[in-house]
């Protein structure tokens, strides 16, 4: 059995991965806002930073089905911490990497910019809250998880890899590539089985879905669980695994990506000024503390 490293190489910050996503998936922001237009981002066909490609090499090598099932079991019971949503946002802020010369944007500001963009567009309150909490699962890094097991595009394990997955050629080093059953179109699944029956690569999406599933409406849970599933919502892949409910719900995932990727504006949000509004919104859905 191949073992996985805790961290052999890493991105200088999560910003580096997020910038790469904007390059690869240029898209039009919603009308009437001041968010950056697609031409403001670099061409995704340009050579990525070496650290980004190394990140995906690790991700594609070690995200096996065995690894995924192990993480599902490890995090099935949430007992690492008890804290409220705003407290978790402040905790996540410690992930800012002072060694990165290109950005000093704290994690809490990305969450607030995403939520504020949703709010400006008059989105439902659950949608605004989703923008606020969608990346909180990145706290896994603060508990010793390597970045390749926290961020990155997600994909199904246990069936053939889509060639449209970013750097799909790097899957040749994954032990699952040698498992015949896993390399057929359906693999271990059945046509139209539904994504809730599909094991996805492990990361902050699946973890945060498990944290919030007792509190948020179905649409919010769905967006959180699949917002990094770019092969599906940007490339149109894996539709044959979806049921009709998945196809309906992906409307929300696609709409959310406009806010996740393109919500950065020159004016940085003031967390303390915005805190009363968002604490009131949080209290509509969450108790003062939840298990993480």
Image (spheres, rainbow, N blue to C red):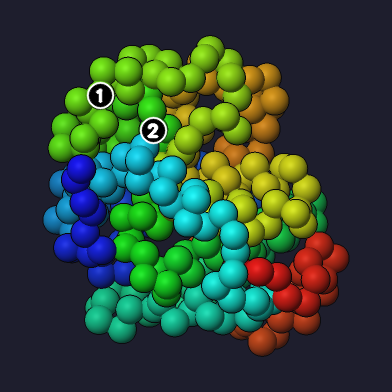
Horizontal side of residue 237 vs 60, given as left or right: right
Specify few, some or many for label 1: CA neighbours under 10 Å numbering under 14, 14-19, or 20 or more.
few
Residue 266's x, y, as percent? Answer: 49, 71
Residue 127's x, y, as percent? Answer: 72, 52
Horizontal side of residue 208 vs 20, given as left or right: right
Secondary-structure class at tag 2: loop
Specify few, some or many for label 2: CA neighbours under 10 Å numbering under 14, 14-19, or 20 or more.
many
Residue with the mark numbered 1: 179
Residue 258 lies, with reference to residue 171, above or below; the image says: below
The reply to whether residue 279 is visible in this rendering is yes
Residue with the mark numbered 2: 157
Disc 2 and disc 1 in contact, CB within 8 angstroms? no
Residue 182 figure quarter = top left
Residue at image position (33%, 78%) is 97
Residue at image position (64%, 64%) is 132
Residue 28's x, y, as percent? Answer: 51, 42
Residue at image position (47%, 30%) is 232
């Amino acid at each position: 059995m191949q073992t996985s490293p805790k961290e052999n190489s890493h991105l200088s910050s999560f910003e580096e991965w997020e910038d790469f996503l904007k390059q690869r998936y240029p898209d039009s922001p919603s009308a009437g806002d001041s968010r950056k237009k697609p031409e403001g981002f670099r061409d995704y066909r340009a050579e990525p930073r070496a650290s980004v490609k190394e990140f995906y090499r690790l991700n594609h090598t070690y995200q096996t089905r065995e690894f995924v099932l192990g993480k599902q079991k490890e995090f099935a019971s949430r007992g690492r911490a008890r804290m409220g949503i705003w407290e978790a946002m402040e905790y996540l802020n410690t992930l800012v990497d002072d060694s990165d010369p290109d950005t000093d944007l704290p994690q809490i500001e990305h969450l607030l910019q995403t939520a504020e963009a949703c709010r400006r567009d008059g989105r439902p309150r659950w949608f605004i809250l989703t923008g606020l909490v969608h990346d909180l699962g990145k706290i896994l890094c603060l508990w010793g998880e390597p970045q390749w097991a926290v961020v990155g595009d997600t994909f199904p394990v246990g069936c053939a890899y889509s060639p449209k997955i970013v750097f799909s050629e790097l899957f040749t080093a994954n032990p699952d590539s040698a498992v015949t059953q896993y390399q057929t179109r359906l693999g271990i699944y059945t046509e139209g089985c539904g994504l809730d029956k599909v094991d996805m690569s492990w990361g902050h999406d699946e973890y945060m879905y498990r944290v919030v599933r007792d509190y948020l409406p179905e649409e919010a849970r769905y967006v959180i669980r699949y917002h990094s599933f770019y092969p599906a919502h940007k490339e149109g892949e894996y539709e044959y695994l979806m049921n009709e409910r998945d196809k309906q719900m992906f409307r929300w995932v696609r709409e959310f990506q406009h806010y996740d990727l393109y919500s950065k504006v020159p004016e940085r949000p003031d967390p303390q000024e915005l805190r009363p509004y968002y604490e009131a919104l949080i209290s509509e859905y969450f108790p003062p503390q939840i298990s993480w």
